[in-house]
Image: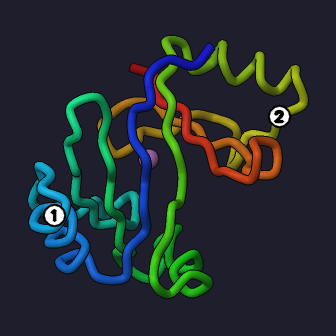
């Protein structure tokens, strides 16, 4: 069902410091910060060639990652994103297997303009999983 690892998302308390770390210390290709108001995050993309790391920082009062940062003040890995070719088919198959889909269960448009869904971490080895249709 799942294909490539599209990205790994890491929540960070200081986006500029995290960008410097990935660019200067790790020598990676790092984008400028991009504010995604409707997602409630500001993101920096780290392009690794075969996949990406997304550095996320809360944007606005209703940010979905604000609580994560409260619980993990120095930041931490937030989710992994796997590509699927048909997100509704994947969702229905996963639900039939007993997996829980977060939110309304309907795909929303994610940070890359593609339909996404999130799966309950308790059903996937303690890891929040995002599915993105590409
Ligand atoms: Co993501």
Q: Residues within 10 Å of mark 1 (few under 14, many from 20)?
A: some
Q: Nearer the viewer, residue 22 or 109?
A: 22
* Residue 78 x, y percent position in the rendering: 53, 60
* Residue 73 x, y percent position in the rendering: 50, 87
Q: Residues within 10 Å of mark 2 (few under 14, many from 20)?
A: some
- Whether residue 36 sits left or right of residue 121 in the image: it is left
* Residue at which label 1 appears: 33
At horizontal 66% and vertical 18% (from top left) the residue drawn is: 90
* Residue 95 x, y percent position in the rendering: 82, 27
At horizontal 83% and vertical 34% (from top left) the residue drawn is: 99
- Image quarter of residue 88: top right
Q: Number of labelled discs? A: 2
| Location of the N terminus (image quadrant) | top right
The disc placed on residue 42 is none
Question: In the rendered view, would you say 31 is above or below 95?
Answer: below
* Residue at which label 2 appears: 99
């Amino acid at each position: 069902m799942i294909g490539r690892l599209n990205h790994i998302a890491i929540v960070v308390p200081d986006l500029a410091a995290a960008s410097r770390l990935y660019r200067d210390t790790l020598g990676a290709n790092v984008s400028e910060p991009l504010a995604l108001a409707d997602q409630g995050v500001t993101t920096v993309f780290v392009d690794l060639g075969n996949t990406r790391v997304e550095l996320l920082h809360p944007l606005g009062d209703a940010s979905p990652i604000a609580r994560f940062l409260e619980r993990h003040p120095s930041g931490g890995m937030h989710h992994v994103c796997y590509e699927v070719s048909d997100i509704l088919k994947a969702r229905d198959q996963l639900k039939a297997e007993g997996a829980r889909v977060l939110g309304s269960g309907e795909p929303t448009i994610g940070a890359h303009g593609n339909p996404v869904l999130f799966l309950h971490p308790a059903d996937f080895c303690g890891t929040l999983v995002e599915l993105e249709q590409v």
